[in-house]
Image: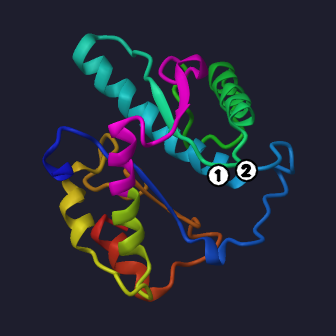
Amino acid sequence: MLARKEVRLFTVASHKTNMRGYQNTRIGNGFGRGEFYNWCLRLLLERVSDWCSRRSLRLSGQSEVAKVVFSKRGGHDYSHLYGYLDTLVMQAEAKTTFLKAREVVPGVLQTKYCEVMPDSKIAGLQLVDIVASSFFQASDSLQANYSLTSVQELKARTAIAKGKRDPAGYGLLRLPFPHQAQIPQNDEPLFEMFGY
């Protein structure tokens, strides 16, 4: 059903087992609790805001604000997240972003248009659960229900960066990055399917 909808999908797939204990000394502990989750959201929103900007420019001639709805996670400090996102937007506007591989698009991402809701209240958040479950099921070959079937169907709806031919690094971002660690060989078929 989701593969037939006019949607674009984005996934950050983090192999947490080999990322446990990883510290980036340049970042420090400035963002406190939820730092890894916020970092993953940053990577996701850099790509989502880029796609939304390009799409709205094509449709209306201007980059428009996106409404962002986060699924409520118990124990996560969303005011902290919003502060982090505001910092990223200010850095992008001032051209002072520390890691410049990508940036959030300031006109698209504005925290005043972000909200947190339980996924039981918004159908779109339940669709996100389909994507997350499908990629989770395809990413760990040791699971009893391991399968690539669902992600194969979702591949056509997974976002592709401008000038690219496949979703690798954009619609599907794999963590850790290659300079940090490797994905177990048995779990590589998912990523190879998406262009890694």
Residue 124 in the figure: left or right of residue 68: left
In the image, residue 98 sits, relative to residue 145, either above or below, namely above
Residue contact between numbered discs 2 and 1, judged by CB atoms under 8 Å: yes
- Identify the mark at residue 34; answer none if there is no mark: 2
Tell me the residue at 44%/17% (across/down): 65
- Identify the mark at residue 37; answer none if there is no mark: 1
Q: Foreground residue, 75 or 4? A: 75
Residue 113 belongs to the span the image colors magenta? yes
Residue 24 belongs to the span the image colors magenta? no
Secondary structure under badge 1? helix
In the image, residue 101 sits, relative to residue 51, either above or below, namely below
Looking at the rendering, the stretch of residues picked out in magenta corresponds to 107-131
Residue 64 location, quadrant:
top left
Q: Percent x, y for residue 163?
A: 29, 43
**Amino acid of disc 1:** Tyr
**Amino acid of disc 2:** Gly
In the image, residue 34 sits, relative to residue 85, either above or below, namely below
Tell me the residue at 65%/49% (across/down): 74
